[in-house]
Image (tube, grey):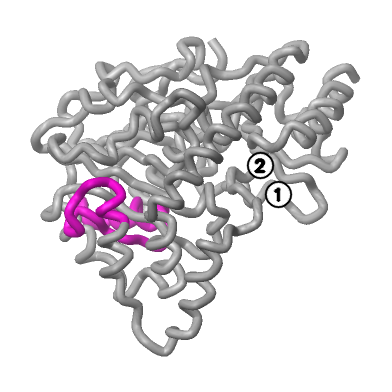
C-alpha cells in the first residue's frame, strides 16, 4: 500500500502542514502546475458587470440579487443560499458555528482548510483515511455512525476522485451535519455526460446537508473571493450569525450574479468538456512514464500521481522551471505523491518531456 493506513485516526500536532497551499509552490518564473485556477481571459459577459460594479463602491454591498441568481441556478429558494468570501470562508463559519458538535470527522486525503478551520476553532478532529490502493474511493461504512459532523470533498482535492452521489447521500442522517465541498464540481462534466454529475447541490431532502461551492476556480477569480453555501435555512442562519458584516464585496457579488446565469452555465459545460480532453491527454502521457502511477480515475482539473522519490522529483522540476503541488501536506499521502494541474496539450507535452528526462536521470 502507498501512503498511510486507512481507517479512523486522530489528528497529530504539527504534521502535516495543513496551512500549506499550492500558491506557495507557484513562485514567479515557474510554469504553474501547482494551482488549480483556470487562467484564460475573462469573458466579456463576466468582465463587464464586475467592472461596472466599481462605480458603486460608495454604497454598501447588497447581496440579494446575487443570492437570488445563485438560488435560481440550483432550483432552490434564496434562503437556502449563503454567500461567502470564497469557499474557504464557509469552512471557518461551519467550524465556529458548530462549536461543541460531537465527534467531527474529516475524510482524507482532501483540501486541508476544513480540518484547519475546525482545529483553529478548538475542535478535536478525527480523520478517515481512504485507501490509495482502492483508488481513494469512499466507503460510507468507514465513517463513525455517531459522528455529528462529516466533511468530504467531491470531486476531492487532491485525488481528483468523483464519489458517487449515492455514497455521499448515505452519510446524511438526522442529527449530523454533512459538508460536501464541491469547489470543483463544475469541472467534472464531459461530452455526453450531464453537467456536474454526482453533485448534491440540488438536493433539498437530505438532513443536515451543506454543499460548499466556489466560483473562483473555473473563472479565474481567486483574487476576488466569492463562493457560497447551500443548505437548510435554519442551519445557514446559524452560520450567518458568525459571519462578519458585508463579507462579500460589490464586485464579487456582480461576479456571482453573472456566473449563475444560463450563459455562464453553458460556458462551464463547454470548458469542462475541453478540460476532459486535456485531462485524458495528461493522464495518457503520465501513465507511459516508468514508475509513475496515476491515482484513481481523475475527474477534475488536476491529477494525483505516485512516484517513489516524488519529493526529489518535485525539486528537480523546480530547478527546470516547473511548479507542481507537493503531496506530503495532505493527510493520508506522503512525499512520493504529487498533484499536477491539467493544462493545454502543448503545456502538458513540454512538461512530460522535462519530467521524463528527470526520471531517466
Q: Which residue is mark 1?
A: 26
Q: Is residue 96 magenta?
A: yes
Mark number, residue 98 = none
Q: Position of residue 74 (x, y in %)?
A: 27, 46
When the figure is inspected, residue 277 is found, relative to residue 290, above or below; the finding is below
Range shown magenta: 70-98
* Direction from residue 105 to residue 30 in the image, left or right: right
Q: Are marks 1 and 2 in contact (CB under 8 Å)?
A: yes
The image quadrant where one finds the C terminus is top right
Let me know if residue 66 appears in the view: yes
Q: Position of residue 29 (x, y in %)?
A: 82, 53
Q: Position of residue 299 (x, y in %)?
A: 50, 27
- Residue at the location (69% across, 19% down)? 307
Going from N to C along the chain, the mark reached first, 1 or 2, is: 1
Q: Is residue 172 magenta?
A: no
Query: Which quadrant of the view contains residue 107?
Result: top left
Query: Which quadrant of the view contains residue 341?
Result: top right
Q: Main secondary structure of the magenta part?
A: helix
Mark number, residue 34 = 2
Identify which residue, 114 or 178, lies in the foreground: 178
- Residue at the location (76% across, 15% down)? 289
Amino acid at each position: 500500500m502507498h501512503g498511510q493506513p486507512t481507517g479512523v485516526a486522530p489528528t497529530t500536532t504539527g504534521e502535516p502542514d495543513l496551512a500549506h497551499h499550492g500558491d506557495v509552490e507557484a513562485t514567479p518564473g515557474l510554469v504553474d502546475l501547482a494551482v488549480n485556477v483556470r487562467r484564460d481571459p475573462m469573458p466579456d459577459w463576466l468582465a463587464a458587470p464586475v467592472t461596472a460594479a466599481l462605480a458603486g463602491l460608495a454604497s454598501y454591498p447588497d447581496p440579494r440579487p446575487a443570492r437570488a441568481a445563485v438560488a435560481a441556478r440550483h432550483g432552490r429558494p434564496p434562503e437556502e443560499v449563503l454567500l461567502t468570501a470564497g469557499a474557504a470562508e464557509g469552512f471557518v463559519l461551519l467550524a465556529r458555528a458548530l462549536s461543541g458538535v460531537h465527534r467531527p470527522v474529516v475524510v482524507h486525503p482532501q483540501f486541508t482548510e476544513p480540518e484547519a478551520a475546525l482545529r483553529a476553532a478548538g475542535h478535536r478532529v478525527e480523520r478517515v483515511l481512504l485507501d490509495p490502493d482502492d483508488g481513494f474511493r469512499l466507503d460510507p461504512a468507514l465513517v463513525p455512525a455517531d459522528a455529528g459532523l462529516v466533511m468530504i470533498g467531491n470531486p476531492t482535492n487532491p485525488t481528483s476522485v468523483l464519489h458517487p452521489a449515492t455514497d455521499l447521500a448515505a452519510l446524511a442522517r438526522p442529527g449530523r451535519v454533512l459538508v460536501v465541498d464541491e469547489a470543483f464540481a463544475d469541472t467534472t462534466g464531459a461530452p455526453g455526460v450531464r453537467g456536474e454529475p454526482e453533485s448534491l447541490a440540488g438536493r433539498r431532502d437530505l438532513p443536515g446537508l451543506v454543499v460548499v461551492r466556489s466560483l473562483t476556480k473555473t473563472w479565474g477569480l481567486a483574487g476576488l473571493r466569492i463562493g457560497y453555501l447551500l443548505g437548510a435555512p435554519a442551519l445557514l442562519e446559524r452560520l450567518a450569525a458568525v459571519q462578519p458584516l458585508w463579507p462579500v464585496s460589490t464586485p464579487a457579488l456582480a461576479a456571482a450574479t453573472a456566473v449563475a446565469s444560463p450563459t455562464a452555465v453553458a460556458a462551464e459545460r463547454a470548458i469542462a468538456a475541453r478540460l476532459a480532453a486535456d485531462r485524458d491527454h495528461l493522464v495518457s502521457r503520465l501513465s507511459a512514464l516508468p514508475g509513475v502511477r496515476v491515482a484513481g480515475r481523475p475527474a477534475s482539473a488536476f491529477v494525483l500521481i505516485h512516484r517513489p522519490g516524488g519529493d526529489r522529483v518535485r525539486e528537480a522540476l523546480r530547478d527546470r522551471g516547473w511548479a507542481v503541488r507537493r503531496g506530503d501536506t495532505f493527510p493520508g499521502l506522503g512525499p512520493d505523491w504529487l498533484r499536477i494541474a491539467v493544462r493545454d496539450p502543448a503545456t502538458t507535452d513540454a512538461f512530460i518531456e522535462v519530467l521524463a528526462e528527470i526520471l531517466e536521470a
